[in-house]
């Protein structure tokens, strides 16, 4: 059996990390960086707000995912062919967005931003499918954690790095640099191997659209698993929606928040994701979901403790370290588990649908969090967010019991 070091430092893990970077990079190019550019150009705030709609392809990517399961391009194979096309077109769209003029051409800016999000979402579809098909079930936990960490580094480069560069050069030049940063992902696609296609892949478009749903809902406990996907990180998402107003309201300065929450917190999240991946190699995904889920809930309760202590920087650092470590571990286990739910015949479609579902509770449940914080107070609000994590944990008893009986569930979709 390979050692832990040998399991971590493999070609497949490096590919997962680099593909994560390539997927994380484009996300904020159409959000925070574009918003900063439009604000600098004097674009009306209403128009800037409406630009959020260009992110819709990330929500509806499951609509064209069946095409990527059904058709294979005549080069590089079923996954790498589509991935290379998505990445090259994405880099071109980023260049195109950088060559627009936000104040004079708002509609063109919106169109180019929409192309960026469409090709970015398409890249996400194929990368998720590739990771599931390239890694064994035992490797999915660590591979997912490295993917998430690469994703976060890509986001940091696009947002923080992009804004720093924009102080010294034009935004157009920044977008050209960001387009060039897609090269590592393109090179990775060209050099990595094509994972073997599962037997019984869709032979018609009808099969590609209908069979993924039929196959999934034939499984025992299918609805319980969907409910778990919706609820597992619900408390964590609700708490996160109000943390920034919370920090400022109880008396922390913006400098303290930026230094502790953003900088220190980023590396704590990265460490949590990596630790979660390593732990999953030893414990497996099911046990990790239990432990990391409990830690997520306890870490949310830490904000209630911070509310009673007030603006103490050491306490803030401790709460942020614990919360981000737990969240990083929980996210890695959650993504790995979602991958095990997919059938390798329709990986792209089923994973795209599941990942789209994650956004539903995050948006809907986060909407009333401001009213809840006002009504319950900060302590009451974070205690509620802690308790709302319990249903997701209880659902684990349905299909991932702690014992030998739960072991077969992870293999059911393979």
Image (spheres, rainbow, N blue to C red):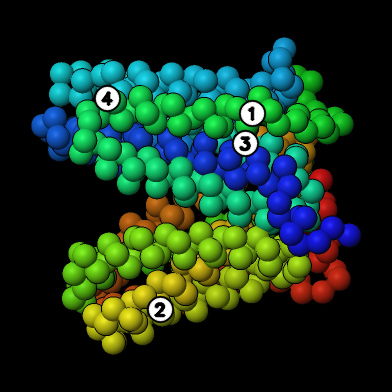
Which residue is pictured at 50% across the width and 79% down the height? Answer: 298
Mark 2 or mark 3, whichever is nearer to me? 2
Cα separation between marks 3 and 4: 28 Å
Helix, strand or loop under label 3 = helix
Compare residues 327 and 313 and report the one nearer the observer. 313
Cα separation between marks 2 and 1: 40 Å
The disc label shown at residue 318, or none:
2
Mark 3 or mark 4, whichever is nearer to me? 4
N-term mark: 2 or 4: 4
Helix, strand or loop under label 2 = helix
Cα separation between marks 2 and 3: 35 Å
Q: Residues within 10 Å of mark 4 (few under 14, many from 20)?
A: some
Which residue is pictured at 35% across the width and 35% down the height? Answer: 29
Q: Which residue is mark 3?
A: 127
N-term mark: 3 or 4: 3
Asked whether disc 2 touches disc 1, contact meaning CB atoms under 8 Å apart, the reply is no
Q: How many marks?
A: 4
Asked whether disc 1 touches disc 3, contact meaning CB atoms under 8 Å apart, the reply is no
Give x and y (percent) for residue 312.
27, 82
The disc label shown at residue 172, or none:
4
Asked whether disc 4 touches disc 1, contact meaning CB atoms under 8 Å apart, the reply is no
Give x and y (percent) for residue 185.
56, 32
Helix, strand or loop under label 1 = helix
N-term mark: 1 or 3: 3
Picture quarter containing residue 131? Answer: top right
Cα separation between marks 1 and 3: 10 Å
């Amino acid at each position: 059996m390979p050692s832990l070091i040998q399991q971590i430092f493999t070609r497949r893990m490096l590919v997962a990390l680099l593909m994560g970077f390539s997927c994380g990079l484009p996300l904020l190019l159409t959000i925070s960086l574009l918003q900063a550019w439009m604000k600098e150009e004097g674009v009306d705030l209403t128009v800037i707000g409406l630009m959020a709609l260009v992110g819709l392809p990330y929500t509806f990517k499951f609509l064209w995912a069946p095409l990527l399961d059904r058709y294979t391009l005549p080069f590089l194979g079923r996954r790498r062919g589509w991935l290379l096309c998505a990445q090259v077109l994405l880099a071109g769209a980023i260049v195109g967005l950088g060559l627009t003029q936000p104040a004079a051409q708002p509609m063109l800016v919106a169109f180019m931003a929409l192309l960026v999000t469409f090709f970015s979402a398409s890249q996400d579809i194929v990368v998720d499918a590739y990771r599931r098909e390239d890694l064994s079930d035992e490797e999915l936990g660590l591979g997912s954690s490295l993917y998430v960490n690469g994703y976060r580094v890509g986001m940091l480069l696009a947002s923080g790095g992009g804004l720093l560069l924009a102080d010294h050069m034009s935004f157009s030049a920044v977008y050209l640099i960001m387009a060039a940063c897609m090269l590592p992902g393109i090179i990775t696609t060209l050099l990595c191997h094509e994972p073997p296609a599962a037997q019984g892949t869709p032979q018609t478009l009808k099969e590609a659209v209908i069979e993924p749903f039929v196959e999934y809902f034939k499984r025992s406990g299918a609805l319980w698993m969907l409910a778990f996907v919706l609820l597992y990180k619900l408390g964590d998402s609700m708490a996160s929606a109000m943390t920034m107003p919370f920090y400022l309201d109880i008396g922390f300065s913006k400098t303290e928040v930026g230094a502790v929450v953003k900088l220190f917190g980023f590396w704590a999240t990265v460490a949590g994701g990596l630790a979660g991946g390593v732990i999953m190699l030893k414990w497996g995904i099911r046990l990790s979901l239990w432990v990391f889920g409990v830690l997520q809930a306890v870490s949310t309760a830490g904000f209630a403790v911070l509310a009673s202590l007030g603006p103490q920087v050491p306490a803030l650092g401790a709460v942020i370290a614990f919360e981000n470590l737990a969240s990083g571990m929980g996210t890695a286990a959650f993504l790995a588990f979602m991958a095990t739910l997919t059938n390798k015949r329709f990986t792209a479609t089923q994973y795209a649908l599941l990942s789209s579902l994650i956004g539903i509770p995050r948006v809907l449940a986060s909407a009333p969090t401001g009213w809840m914080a006002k009504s319950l107070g900060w302590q009451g609000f974070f205690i509620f967010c802690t308790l709302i994590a319990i249903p997701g944990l209880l659902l684990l008893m349905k299909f991932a019991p702690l014992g030998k009986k739960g072991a077969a569930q992870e293999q059911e979709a393979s």
